[in-house]
Image: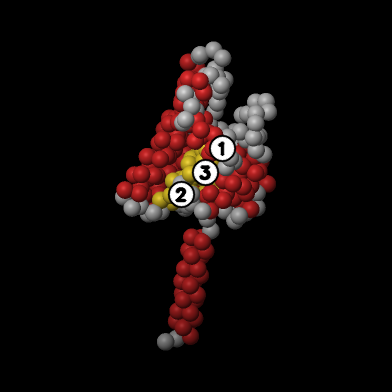
Amino acid sequence: MTDYSVAASHFDAIWLHYAQMSRLLERAVQKAIIVGASSGIGWELAIQLADAGYQLGLMARREDRLHELAEKLPGTHWVQYADVTMCEDSQQHLQDLIERMNGVDMVVLNSGVGILEGRLEWDNQRTMIDVNVRGFCALAVVAMQHFENVGTGHLVGISSLAAHVSGASMPTYHASKAFVTSYLNGLRGRVERRKAPITITVVEPGFVRTPMVLGSPPWMASVDRAVQQMMTAIVRKKAHVFITRRWRLVAWMAYLMPTTWLAKRF
């Protein structure tokens, strides 16, 4: 064997070792996509996940806010515009982002909208249904298909305490969140029946200090505290978490009270 052949063989061995190590390191880095990362819970969750070492895909309609967020975060992250009311387009955007990131370990579906309904108007109801139900399902399907293809994954869905209480002030919002919780529980049953190593986490916040909450309702949690509790649930791969934990008592009591009596007070 010539000196050139020995050197080439040695170089090939080094390159193979480097490629293998790179693949191992890439798999070791946790990657997550947050849909609805441009404000509130999604924004703070991106900060805390990035601080924990995650590489993130940031999705929302306000692309300028996503770029602003990405520049603040340590590490490498991706930005993707998406309007979840355009279901098929947003599905393609999510699929494209997953491919750009070379796969992800977790998808957080955080997009949601709530509108007071002092007067019943179909335009407002349609907006909430399009975002909270149709858009949510469309993106959940893409995330679950990816996890099923790779054999593992973690889907986190942001629902609400409102899922457990009918509300006269926002009947469509409450109904949409009841759908989200029931849908995610159904997905969990589906993967457990198939014994698939996929985690489904339902997050049900009470009142969190975000632009979506009006006034000063009781037990208002700061967004950083709320997300800290979410992070604990994510790390522990819990099936369900109330944010903050005291709201589980309210949810339990809600099932003991007359539905109409309770609805008049929300």
How many numbered marks have been drawn onto this rendered protein structure?
3
- 3 or 2: mark nearer the eye: 3
Q: Name the residue under label 3.
A: 241
Q: Helix, strand or loop at disc 1? A: helix
Disc number for residue 247: 1
Of 170 and 97, the residue lying toward us: 170
Which residue reaches farthest front? 256
> Residue 61: horizontal and vertical position, in percent?
56, 33
> Residue 222: horizontal and vertical position, in percent?
67, 39
Of 161 and 132, the residue lying toward us: 161
- 2 or 1: mark nearer the eye: 1
Mark 3 / mark 2, whichever is N-terminal: 2
Judge left or right: residue 187 versus residue 129: left
In the picture, which quadrant includes the N terminus? bottom left
User: Which residue: 65% across, 34% down?
Assistant: 220
User: Which residue: 52% across, 50% down?
Assistant: 234
Q: Helix, strand or loop at disc 2? A: strand
In the picture, which quadrant includes the C terminus? top right
Judge left or right: residue 119 versus residue 136: right
Amino acid type at image mark 2:
His
- 1 or 3: mark nearer the eye: 1
Bin the neighbour count of mark 2 within 10 Å (Cα to Cα): few under 14, some 14-19, many 20 and up: many
20 lies above or below 180: below
Q: Report the Cα–Cα distance between label 3 and label 2.
A: 15 Å
User: Which residue: 46% across, 83% down?
Assistant: 6
Q: Name the residue under label 2.
A: 154
Q: Report the Cα–Cα distance between label 2 and label 1.
A: 24 Å
> Residue 157: horizontal and vertical position, in percent?
48, 40
- Please say whether residue 17 is visible from this viewpoint: yes
